[in-house]
Image (cartoon, coloured by chain):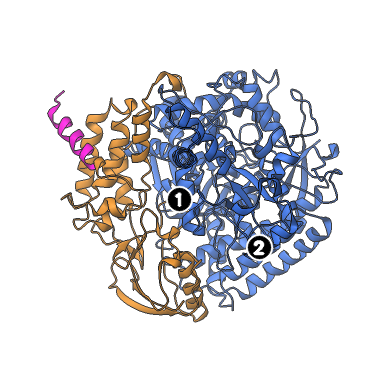
Chain colours: A orange, B blue
Amino acid sequence: MKLTLKIWRQNDAKAKGKMMEYHLNDVSPDMSFLEMLDVLNQDLIDKDEEPIAFDHDCREGICGMCSMFINGRAHGPDREITVCQLHMRSFKDGDTITIEPWRAKAFPIIKDLIVDRSAFDRIQQAGGFISVNTSGNTQDANNILIAKDAADTAMDAATCIGCGACVASCKNSSAMLFVGAKVSQYALLPQGQVEAVDRVKNMVAQMDLEGFGNCTNTGACEVECPKGISLENIARMNRELVKANMIKF
Amino acid sequence: MSVLDSKVPKGPINDKWTTYKDKINLVNPANKRLIDVIVVGTGLAGGSAAATLAELGYNVKTFCFQDSPRRAHSIAAQGGINAAKNYQGDGDSTYRLFYDTVKGGDYRSREANVHRLAEVSVNIIDQCVAQGVPFARDYGGLLDNRSFGGVLVSRTFYAKGQTGQQLLLGAYSAMNRQIGRGKIKPYNRHEMLDVVIVDGKARGIIARNLVTGEIERHSAHAVVLGTGGYGNAFYLSTYAMGSNVTAAWKAHKRGAFFANPCFTQIHPTCIPVSGDHQSKLTLMSESLRNDGRIWVPAKLEDAKAIQEGKLKPTKIAEEDRDYFLERRYPAFGNLVPRDVASRAAKERCDAGFGVNATGEAVYLDFAAAIQRYGKEQAHVKGLDENDAALVTKLGKEMIKSKYGNLFQMYEKIIDENPYETPMMIFPAVHYTMGGIWVDYNLMTTVPGLYAIGEANFSDHGANRLGASALMQGLADGYFVLPYTIGDYLADDIRTGPISIDTPEFDEAENNVRERLDKLINNKGKYSVDHFHKRLGKIMWNKCGMSRNAKDLKEAINEIAALRKEFWEDVKIPGRADEYNEELAKAGRVADFLELGELFAKDALEREESCGGHFREEHQTEEGEAKRRKEFQYVAAWEYKGEPSDAVLHKEDLKYEDIEVKERSYK
């Protein structure tokens, strides 16, 4: 396939960026999207130009490192996958493909398509854990009974890979799906109850502090989430927050 | 007398760890505040160690090359984690897990370490449940288990096909709690480029900030490496793109012996290579072998027709299929250990029975399982068991609930529906059992330098059993290192902070800078990937699933020549003082080019077949691996300059509680 690529190039956070155009003539439909970019980068290196910087690591859809806005959609046209799982068979010969980084105030650009998502880490540090010491001297695992449905629903929320597609897709750059998923995982499990009040308050406060927007129930995040995390998690987070705000110790 | 002292405590194996813990030195809580520890790598081993050390009161700095600890490649582990809980009442015990692991490793692991691993395995599950890891449950709310290769019990705990992810996020959450308390300082997008040794002890590291290119000095009283394996020496593997040997190799160059580098796991169930553009291989979890049956056509003409695209697998009659694992290994069938399954698949493909265009694939078929589950579900629900369409529908639903994400992953890559047509799989490099030599305390041959998880060599011998990597990573990080490191640090309570303004730090930093300058100013003809791919081809063809003296000797020469060529002709764009992925990659490939040669040398020296290391010269009449008693040792290599000059030290392996037998799965 022949492809025209329009790719955002930006040297660092302070530099002014712009779209640059590149052409590839021999793209196989069996290539993954990132392998197509590997080929382009190889060309650029051969021509003594700087390769395009992009985040990637596991290339099997689980590490959450890859993050590209392709033709106006997070992780490209296919559903429930990350960029690294997107294959060139999703495109046609002669297509023009536009590739941009995640765009959000809370995700400053580091270089080209790479953004700084450390805001997500800081939200987790504010409360995304259960305060149990890692001594192993806890009770036997089977002493905590958890209904299969609750365990499964918690697992569904816990599959979030922290890629940031929800933020990038949201017109408000809201991180509520990300935060909702973590709050939900613990809210659904008995182990998470003790700290439920503090957790949701602290995580939401940190989320606001980082400059993420609010949720206006558009639902783009759910559509673009590579792991299919449901909007219910935002509802559950809101419920947890309302509950937390009503409790006074 | 070997220079290697394993420091295995005396006494009966059941009591060694408990008695040892009772006697070793401790650091009191007030003094822990005076001690700094650096942890490099934040996967299951590094992440869990960092969290626990911080919780104990040490000041911890963590380093990872990813943008967040949550992205370490432990996250990609799919199937599960072993623990000798015996929740299923199927006869499991600490001894059995210990026995299976030693046998699975083909009697090339250290008995006392493996027993300790089996002992603490039960704590891991308790710990992870307490911290909110959503393991799979049954309808009564109890934990569910499944079975993995090389064992006869169900001891594997899992969280759908994302167990590694959930366990890593558990360790990450424990880290986050300590970061929030200020006890861990995370340095993400940082890469360790040297270890600093002061007065014979590891006292810090030199790291490069991958965003700004700055070279930084960090000091500590001890340095822990949890930096994973080196399978990317093969270029194509199931590792993450960034996984590398650099930290471990720098440690090796500073005096840490490197053990059994040739022990590499080639995992049987990966998605086959599709073309030259391929950048990595994707694993299909071993758990699939619980329900999938592996086969190739029994007739050569059928295999030919399939390779040419003229025949569909579903059209081949049952009697014309060769379920070669079930045929060769009736007792374990499709659940033989990984090394055995991989070699058997290679044997069939080499004989011409492969099932894709390249002839390098076998089928993993779920049709029988779909029918079995479908019938069971129809019966349970009181529906018609003879309604074929209904049974198939119910069966597919059941398979989806068990392996849905894996099937989806397969379909996205291959563009075929594995519910309808069998999956195609082929072995790929997946894990390295070899690594930095450590003693019972997980300390390397450099005092104060520790290696945990996949980065060390210890627990899996010549072959790792499925679902044991997660177990070892967390065992080392949560439950072993935090005790053993105290014994060493107890001597450091009066040392005070380690200065970074010393000649040792100067030397190490200059070393790092010189090398980076050399790479960036080289302005050769070929990119880093060009060399990496060539190294990968040598490794796969000559040091892969089956090895012989001639190939290995060639590999040694070819890798040495390629390394020379790399340093003359590598081309790296951009500058050293900015974000520059090519530069980071170049440093890693340069290290792989040294490790690769040592790997081949080790494989050449080990004149036997065991586990993942198969020497064609040493096989039984049936083509099984033939172990040799005189090689019952750990090969630990000391760095002396060029890999060809490395000096071999042997740690003899003694088996007091397990009888060394022929490893049979028949």
Circle 2 Cα neighbour tier, 10 Å, few/some/many (<14 / 14–19 / ≥20):
many
Position of B192 relative to B43 (above/below): below
Side of A7 where B125 appears, left or right: right
The secondary structure that dominates the magenta segment is helix
Residue at image position (46%, 19%) is A140
- Describe residue B55's horizontal placement relative to residue B518 as left or right: left
Q: Which mark is residue B285?
A: none
Q: Between B644 and B272, which is closer to the camera in this rendering? A: B272
Q: Which residues are magenta?
A: A234-249
The question of residue B481 being in magenta is answered with no
Nearer to me, B460 or B30 = B460
**Vertical order, B604 against B399 (above or below):** below
Which amino acid type is marked by label 1?
Gln
- Residue B8, percent across and down? 69, 27
Using the numbered discs, state the Cα–Cα distance from disc 1 to disc 2 in whole angstroms: 24 Å
Residue density around tag 1, few if under 14, some if 14–19, many if 20 or more, within 10 Å = some
Q: Quadrant of the C terminus of chain B?
A: top right
Foreground mark, 1 or 2, reads: 2
Mark linked to residue B307: 2
Residue A158 sits in quarter: top left
| Chain letter behind tag 2 | B
The answer to which of marks 1 and 2 sits earlier in the sequence is 2
Judging from the image, what secondary structure is the residue with disc 1 in? helix
Which residue was labeled with disc 1?
A: B408
Given contact means CB atoms under 8 Å apart, are the residues at marks 1 and 2 in contact?
no
The reply to whether residue B452 is visible in this rendering is: no
Which kind of residue does numbered mark 2 sit on? Gln
> Looking at the figure, which quarter contains the N terminus of chain B?
top right
Residue A24 in percent (x, y) is at: 45, 78
- B582 left or right, relative to B15: left
Residue at the location (17% across, 49% down)? A217
Residue at 57% in and 75% down = B522
